Amino acid sequence: MEEAFVHAAPFTGYVFPNETDIPWSLMIVIYPYITGLVAGSFTVATFYHVFGVSRFKPVARFALLTSLSFMLFVPVPLLLHLGHPERALNVILTPHLTSAFAAFGFFAAFYVILVTLEIWFSYREDIVAWAQERNGWRGRFYRALTLGSYEISATTRTYDAKWIKALAVIGIVGAHGLHGYVGFVFGSLKSREWWGSDLMPAIFLVSAIVSGISILIVLYLLISRFRRTPIDKTCLKGLAYMLWGFLIFAMVLEFLEFANIVYKGREGVETIMALVAGPLWFGVWVLQVGGSVAAFFILTYVIWRGTQDRQLVIGVTVSALLMLIAVLAMRWNVVIGGQELSKTMHGLLYFYPPMLGREGLLATSIVFALPFGMLWLLTRLFPPWLPDARQT
């Protein structure tokens, strides 16, 4: 018996022997985190393409590329977690319509097609120009993307703009539904007191938007510094306002969820309080709550004082980094924390992530780095910032 559980998680209190192994590990933590970056970055693009907020124009196309780059690698953590990843397509080939994960397969495929089309319409005029200017494999690549049409006129521009707006409107439902379902999966699991909450889908969705805005801010500032181009302060202020607003909403929802658990005081609430005071104390109170509160006060100060130039950049950057860490901690606290609660509700498990292995820290870091490599490749093929006025 001792050999069978040599890799089992240490625990305290009363724990069933068959739950000393934590099956959902780091890959399941990083999976909703990457999905959230998809929804959040796409939200920024929709504010320009749908609602016409012109201050977001400098990052609108970059936001689309960022969303697609992360979306292409969203299934990777799930595939690495599965014992038989070659069976993944069975979800689509033989769908079970009552399964949330089956719905994810259709949502993911739909969203990839949708955002790809939106990028194509956004770049269509540039693709035509590049097809006529470039030679070699790049020229052939762009000529294939023109689909044989080189017409650029006021009529085609109007047509492209209509399609971009229509796709963006549909994408609002697709991108947010894509991540809202992740919260739905956890919120519908009544077997875990830490998960079964009606607010879970909304919390996952709003925190996803926060993390997506934050990654866009960090990438935009880093790339601007690397390209040695001036930062659009109006755009940065708009992103700061957007991050501040969604952060308030996220903090309120998370507070309401925890207050609801404590107020109802159902059986096992003492174990939940021991969980947030024990294995999760650093992740909850320091990283998640502390990071969110610190980011809120920094953004509030930046907005209230109307800071400019260097102070604005530093304040918004620090806030964005804090929120990226806080949202990642929230994903950890939900996925790992829910499994650290014993089903007897009279014991706690302690999870220590391994460095190596299929779901170790090294493999997880590599998976998280892959979308950034894809984003670099896409920005080389489709530069989001152009010296002329062609961008839509």
Image (cartoon, rainbow, N blue to C red):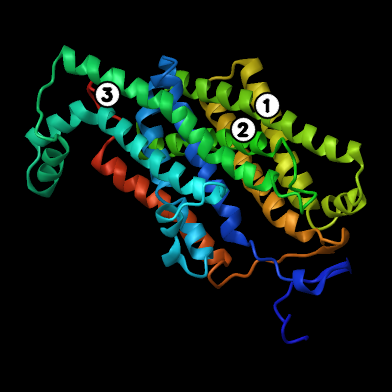
Outermost top residue: 154
Vertical order, 3 against 319 (above or below) = below
Circle 3 residue: 391
Which amino acid lies under the numbered mark 1 shown in the image of this protein?
A: Phe
Residue 384: image location, x then y, percent: 31, 32
The circle drawn on residue 249 is: 1
| Earlier residue among tags 1 and 3 | 1
CB-based contact (under 8 Å), mark 1 and mark 2: yes
- How many marks overall? 3
- Mark yes or no: residue 217 visible: no
What's the residue type where badge 3 is placed? Gln
Label drawn at residue 306:
none
Q: Which of 351 and 100 is in front in this view?
A: 100
In three-dimensional space, the C-alpha distance between marks 1 and 2, rounded to whole angstroms, equals 7 Å
Figure quadrant of residue 117:
top left
Could you tell which of marks 3 and 2 lies nearer the N-terminus?
2
Q: Residue at x 50, y 46 (%)?
A: 104
Please indicate whether residue 1 sits to the left or right of residue 220 in the image.
right
